Image: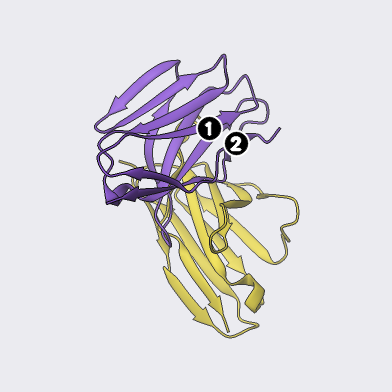
Chain colours: A purple, B yellow
Amino acid sequence: QKEVEQNSGPLSVPEGAIASLNCTYSDRGSQSFFWYRQYSGKSPELIMSIYSNGDKEDGRFTAQLNKASQYVSLLIRDSQPSDSATYLCAVHMNRDDKIIFGKGTRLHILP
Amino acid sequence: GAVVSQHPSRVICKSGTSVKIECRSLDFQATTMFWYRQFPKQSLMLMATSNEGSKATYEQGVEKDKFLINHASLTLSTLTVTSAHPEDSSFYICSAIPTDNYQPQHFGDGTRLSIL
């Protein structure tokens, strides 16, 4: 099993709909989880961090964490064309104290 | 929020040239900085972890004599690509985390390196 796994996409979502991005991880002891957005040709920018089970909301973004299922997700409400980007899931692996990035999911918001 | 400055943003140079890239944390101290490389349409690849005051830790397959890393202070790490060749052309990105290791990484804007 890969350490941090994401569907590469592309995920196409109509404008105004909810985009749902998923990520699974292998290290059960991981404590810190992050979502980054990366536009083509640019460096990643932090969107959300989440450390405990449940939901965390920030504007149109909601991160959801389920440590028992080793699953973290990002929901984007009222999707806008400007949300079209690659979304990277990052997990701080407890066992070797490293932050591991998934390969990213390409999101395309259809106008 | 935390700001990481990376310089230069773009370099175009001839094969055989050595290129130095700087990464600075502007408003926080970073005992650890990371250097990544990203080829077009591919994912981030961690090259090395830079630790202030000690030697960098390189990922498997990354030549430490080609990619020299210096982390002389809590706010500055440099990556030098020595004797660069066209296959070294890529997007190089640094990131830094505050001294609390569980905080998120903050990325610089990246350096696009083109070797002719």
Q: Is residue A35 above or below residue A67?
A: below
- Left or right of residue B71: residue B62: right
Give above or below for B80 relative to A12: below
Residue B115, percent across and down?
Answer: 58, 79
Q: Is residue B36 left or right of residue B100?
A: right
Within 10 Å of the Cα at label 2, are there few (<14), some (14-19), or many (20+) other Cα atoms?
many
Q: Which mark is residue A23?
A: 1
Q: Nearer the viewer, residue A55 or B57?
A: A55
Q: Amino acid at mark 2?
A: Glu
Q: Which mark is residue A5?
A: 2
Residue at 41%, 32% in the rendered image = A74
Same chain for the residues at labels 1 and 2, yes or no? yes
Q: Is residue B88 visible?
A: yes
| Image quadrant occupied by the N terminus of chain A | top right
What mark, if any, has residue A74 been given in the picture?
A: none
Q: Residue at x 56, y 53 (%)?
A: B35
Residue B68 sits in quarter = bottom right
- Residue in the picture at 59% in, 67% down: B80
Dots 1 and 2: beta carbons under 8 Å?
Answer: yes
Q: Is residue A52 shown left or right of residue B90?
A: left
Mark earlier in primary sequence (1, 2): 2
Q: Nearer the viewer, residue A79 or A96?
A: A79
